[in-house]
Image: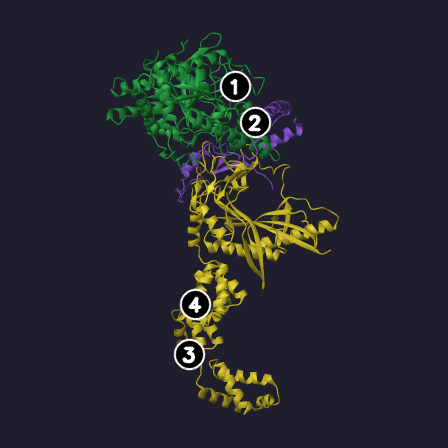
Chain colours: A purple, B green, C yellow
Amino acid sequence: MALTEQDIARLARLSGLRLDSNDQSRARQELDRILGLIEELQAVDTTGIEPMAHPLAAHQEIALRLRDDTAEPAQSAARRDACLRNAPAPHEGLFLVPTVIE
Amino acid sequence: MSQLSEFHSIQALGEALRSRRVSAAELAADALRAARAHADPNIFLQIDDELTLAQARAADQALADGTAGALTGIPIAHKDLFVTEGWRTTAASRMLEGYVSPFDATVVRNLRQAGAVSLGKLSCDEFAMGSANENSAFGPVRNPWDAERIPGGSSGGSAAAVAAGLVLGATGTDTGGSVRQPAAYCGVSGIKPTYGTVSRYGIIAYASSLDQAGPLARSAQDLVPLLDAMSGFDPQDSTSLESCDGRPNTGGRIQADFEAARGAFQAAGQQPLKGLRIGVPREFFNEGLAPAVGAAVESALQVFESLGASRVEISLPLTRLSIPAYYVIAPAEASSNLSRYDGVRYGHRAAQYTDLADMTSRSRSEGFGDEVRRRILVGTYVLSHGYYDAYYLQAQRVRRMIADDFRRALADDCDVIMGPVTPDVARRIGDNRQDPIADWLGDIYTLGVSLAGLPAMSIPCGFGGDSGRLPIGLQIVGRYFDEGRLLALADRYQQATDWHQRTPELA
Amino acid sequence: MDWEIVIGLETHAQLSTQSKIFSRSSTRFGAEPNTQANAVDMALPGSLPAMNRGAVERAIQFGLAVGAHVAPRSVFARKNYFYPDLPKNYQISQFELPIVVGGRLSFFVGEQEHTVNLTRAHLEEDAGKSLHGHFTGPHGESSSGIDLNRAGTPLLEIVSEPEMRSAAEAVAYARTLHGLVVWLGICDGNMQEGSFRCDANVSVRPRGQAEFGTRCEIKNLNSFRFLERAIQYEVRRQIELIEDGGKVVQETRLYDADRDETRSMRTKEDSDDYRYFPDPDLPPLIVSPDWIEQIRQTLPELPAAKRARFESDMGLSPYDAAQLTLHRAVSDYFEAVAAALPAGQAKQAANWILGELSAALNRDGLDIAQSPVPPERLATLIARIQDGTISTKIARDVFAAMWAGESGGDADAIIEAKGLRQISDTGAIETMIDEVLAANPAIVEEYRAGKQKAFNSLVGQVMKAARGKANPQQVNEILKRKLDA
């Protein structure tokens, strides 16, 4: 069940991570080791068992709560700027990113 | 020695504050000094005197007005995973270095409104991923009992701050053991409540279906007002529960349950725990358990028996498999939760890049440490097409089976489950770095509880290691919503023992 | 080679809620950038989603309106991919268990009625917007500005089965779907503002072949005209490609309106493993039968039901009934006119609305809600034709005057003021006819010789003498009687 270089490259791409060739070979080794651990799950017979998403789902009914459709007031430009304070490249209230040509 | 070190409990300090023998502002200023002077500079990631003193002055006002509560003026600190207005929040990561949140986490707000005074933000493992507090981007935290050893993680800073007497309470988060395990290694008390009872809004998400905030403090009794203030239904968190088996999830519930249970124990005289059945999982006492830990837990069980409880052996056959189940589910959820860190709206952006995709991948790779990158890759893998069923869904099925095993035991066989928190005492800083799963294997006793969402505590029950000076923790697991009763049980044990009163001698 | 075209549409309708699907930010269009994006919309650390009841209600309304199954339990899932207008770098959507399953939509293409089955409809959040101005980034790089005001707006994604066989069908389906969501009040239908967007999945196959050909997806078409042109171009492209010996590659394409062509989006390989999994921040959505029933009670009479009623109770043709039930405002107007008229005159009402009124609205660029002629007044006009006060021809002039607001827009006042009352007095008509006959002996001869056109010419002369106001039926009858006598 060993991972190939392509597997690692693909995982890195899907994960939005950049791995240089050293990183890649180390990642391969580490992931192989980790996969060895998680392969242990295959040994469990889970026929007829439903996956569990919320930990209390078997204890009580867990349903999505719905909130009323009321809007908060729009933010002032000043408040918006406070949120943008953490932005690496703010400009006129927008977040700048390098352009993607489609 | 700080002024704070004269007080050994929240109750004692609270009385001194309310009777005006001590002022919150003086106490806070002194506590800040002690925090800055502490030998380990890595426990606190940020201290801001003005922010703290402003809270302390507000506390003094409440104390003067007579509107003070149990936590008014009490010095605490927050794990740097809780977002805070004013203080920066980094999740111990370069990715968020310098980030200032425009809002407070609900837990932070609740404690502030209860009058607690925050001394600042505490170190942790980066994005809560780790069991040793070695994965902080800003330096490892040292165990106050032995500076060469880890304090545990991911809430290592929180446990160390309490153990070192810098605060009387600290917030932590527990996803797979991250409150219980550092509490055990640092000889303090900590509790992870039932999933859904404490709001996750404002906690930087690691694994959404597992993360739960919990306090650490010197004793179970101290944990009560902390947890009670922290918990409560929050409509901003869709996984937050409105009711706990029919009772409203609000402040006061845990306090009331604790007092009712404690009262019952007091009224029962010589054998206060008579009728209590303690389930002891045989799988927790396998060959992986260090003899000293086994011995300390055994002694603790005998104390409970001497108080009238009886023990019964139970079986949690999937204990070992809780490790792969957890390490599929948590990384899967984390890989998605951490996708938002891309250098676009906040956080680290790479200085050099060729295009958008390059900017994103460089920013993330530069901003995240090794363990975080590793878990993101694992998470992406187990969710990817062709593997989702075999890994992620399989893990969620095993999860249900694990939860069922716990529920059955707690319904049919016993009232609480007890056992070790960790297989051994704290290891040395720097060990286990070669093997990515070595630390993961040490989580064996805590993961299943997290997968099932049950409440669990860790309280000091002895010492071990070559020096005989490294703390050992006892884990107590209860039924859903049993937090108050667990705390009362732990408190009863702490009335009969003094492990929780030991403190490390500081250099 | 006889090619069959196969089209399926995926439509994204922005739901008309006040607040966003997972946050309380307003959904109002046109605000200053990033002033309607709170912590949740910006995906700030620690933020979590909370579900808007109004979005769920609207999804249920839609499901009931198309006869679909409303799932008692549906699940929100994360669709993971990196894109700067997607703040969390995942979109909260629904994957395996959507809220609406199945359903169908009927529509007309010309006189031909079609029905297309729907696969499903589900709730999801919209992304933000990229503004491509002349922005420069911190290193001088060409940049785009991200505005997250739109991020988190609730969307209902409606997926059709690939049952359409021409661009015209696809457009008719889209128009009808558009009309329905606006009818229900769940979407404002403003396509310029992006409230209603279609993606078209297009493929071709030799007629008779069971397997589908390889399809391409054309994204984000926000006008019916572009939808039609894009499909037409794409069909031609695929056919030419195959006939030249090539193979259609499955890909996503964009329509370039300026060049009237579709072109491939620059995509990376493996970009489409979205790693869907149930969102752990959102428990399953449970919809009770009681709630569904409550919502069913609040549904307006649906277009299909109204259409059936217009056909059976009011005797309208299927086509006219369909046209009048494309927009609720139009059917409301029609019903108001019909109600103000005696029984049996619904057809006239339909003709006037689909004819003169429609033409005037189009000419002046107005919605029916802005019509200067309200339904009661149109009814009066129609009644005056029916009671012989004016002829149909004159009525058009009266209508034009009503539209322009003359005499307060009142038909009777206009008729009086302009002296347009039809002459129905047979005596007067006889006199006029006698005069015309006397003055046109040659034409009378032509008629007697069998030239029908001569009759019309005489009618014309009588009408001219009457300045258009003679009752045409009476003129015809009396003239014929006199000529044939």
Q: Earlier in the sequence, mark 1 or mark 2?
A: 2
Q: Which mark is residue C419?
A: 3
Q: CA distance from mark 1 to mark 4?
A: 80 Å
The alpha-carbon separation of the residues under discs 1 and 2 comes to 27 Å
Q: Is residue C299 above or below residue C94?
A: below
| Residue C279 image offset from top left, x and y in percent | 50, 36
Question: Looking at numbered disc 1 in the image, what kind of residue is underneath it?
Answer: Gly
Which residue, given by chain and number where applicable, does mark 2 sit on?
Answer: B365
Q: Regarding mark 2 in the picture, which secondary structure is present there?
A: helix
Q: Chain of mark 3?
A: C
Left or right: residue B197 versus residue C199 is left
Comparing marks 4 and 3, which lies closer to the viewer?
A: 4
| SS at circle 1 | loop
Number of the front mark, 1 or 2: 1
User: Where, quadrant-wise, is the N terminus of chain B in this rendering?
Assistant: top left
> How far is the residue under mark 3 from the one under mark 1?
102 Å
Helix, strand, or loop for circle 4? helix
What residue does disc 1 label?
A: B442
Have a look at marks 1 and 2 and say if they share a chain. Answer: yes
Q: Nearer the viewer, residue C244 or B218?
A: B218
Residue C76, percent from left and from top: 50, 40
Q: Amino acid at mark 2?
A: Ser
